[in-house]
Image (tube, helix red, strand yellow):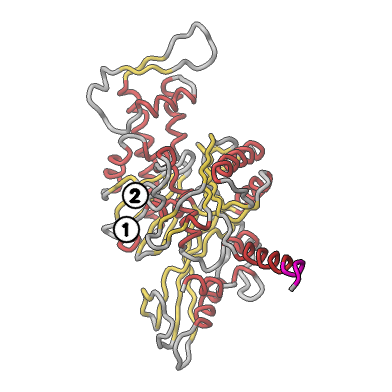
Amino acid sequence: MNRAEAEKKDGREGLKAALSRPPVVAAVDLGASKVTCFIMKPDGVRRGDRTLTTAGVGYVQSRGVRGGAIVNLDEASEAIAQAVERAENVAGVNVQGVTVATAGGQLTSSRVHGRVSIGARPIGDHDLVRAIQHALSQIKLPGRRAAHILPIAWAVDGQGGVRDPRAMFGRTLGVELLVVSVSEAVFQTLGACVERAHLQFEGVVAAPFASALAALEEDEMDLGSVCIDMGGGSTSAAVFTAGSLVHVETVPVGGQHVTQDIARGLSTSIAGAERIKTLHGSAIASANEDREMIEAPPRGDDPGAGPVVAPRSLLKGIIAPRVEETLELLRDRLKASGAPVEPGAGLVLTGGASQLAGVREVAVRVFDRPVRLGRPRRVPHLADAASGPAFTAAAGILHRAAFGPREAVSAKALASAKLKREPLDPHANPVAKAAAWLRDNL
């Protein structure tokens, strides 16, 4: 072999190696308060202890987002581009595409069942594919887009709770799928926003689901738990039972509404109200709060106006009702939905608004369950500034990419499929390619 042929061969082998190398994963948490980007390289995954190492983290103040929805496409895309660029500079890589976590788009979830007959032989992969396809054919999402299609459990001859039915014998095989969906219009707007930032849109992840993957322990998922993600524009919940996500709920009220209440109640600016909430805010009573005075900058630009002075008890009287109302609204929606919350299930609070003093105590009173504050525990080497509850959703996207759970339909297929008024075609539509899930997950 001459030198030219050897160089050509080395070039081909190098190209094959580059194509087979796992891609860089980039996660963007598009919130009403901040936009965060986490980047993970392939060598950042440690499967032994199921932990991750981020190669780069970047975050900026959110713009163009209000109440969990994009209200200014240019400002939101610019914020995404800046957050990604900061993370790229730290990681030393260029990101091609991102997966976005959001609690907007009126997140909802529903369960569908598939059931097929089995002959006198062991259950095989093709039987699992048939069952999943039968369940997918029942999904109808008028005006909505599926974000997740997750298998909850299998059943053989009506016996549920089966984790892997292959090689078992039975007359029927059933599967239960959870379908988490968002508004089609919101989904399209998110895609346009990401593409305007010169990035490829690789799908949407429900923020409470992503936060749960980063914050919950394995035992909490198995025994039952509710992860409540308290963001700036919305408060959402992911319910886990027997190790699987079984329900998603959201209410369009978050930490920004508390800030606005403070601004109105104290006649101060939004920036001043946010600062007061961070420094002095609490949802429970504290000692000497009647005698302790706080100062807030006046609203407007009158140079002769002095600061607004008020007792700290007034601040607590503004914050506590809003926090309690938000959690009560979420509790009532979970009850009305019939979500299968285990009797002994605990609560894990994530999101920036959960860091407000007294929120955990209010949650204990409202839900009458044990409550703890969650952090991205599966990413142990994060800097202190990016290791709090506000960063769990971005960390959860990385965990999902590394460890699953694998879904019945890939995120890219869901992002490209046209799921509007017609049911899913289990043969023609790319959403029905369940064999990929079987290869990855079972």
Residue 151, image x, y percentages:
46, 69
Q: Is residue 139 magenta?
A: no
Q: Earlier in the sequence, mark 1 or mark 2?
A: 1
For label 1, the residue is: 220
Q: Quadrant of the N terminus?
A: bottom right
Residues at circles 1 and 2 in contact by the CB criterion of under 8 Å? yes
Residue 364 or residue 4, whichever sits in front: 4
Q: In the figure, residue 83 lies in which quadrant? A: top right
Residue 347, image x, y percentages:
32, 50
Three-letter amino acid code of the residue under disc 1: Glu
> Circle 2 sits in a helix, a strand or a loop, which is it?
strand
For label 2, the residue is: 348
Three-letter amino acid code of the residue under disc 2: Val
Q: In the figure, residue 218 lies in which quadrant? A: bottom left
Taking the view exactly as shown, the residue that stands out farthest to the front is 2
Magenta stretch?
A: 2-6
| Mark 1 and mark 2: Cα distance apart in space | 9 Å
Q: In the figure, residue 342 lies in which quadrant? A: bottom left
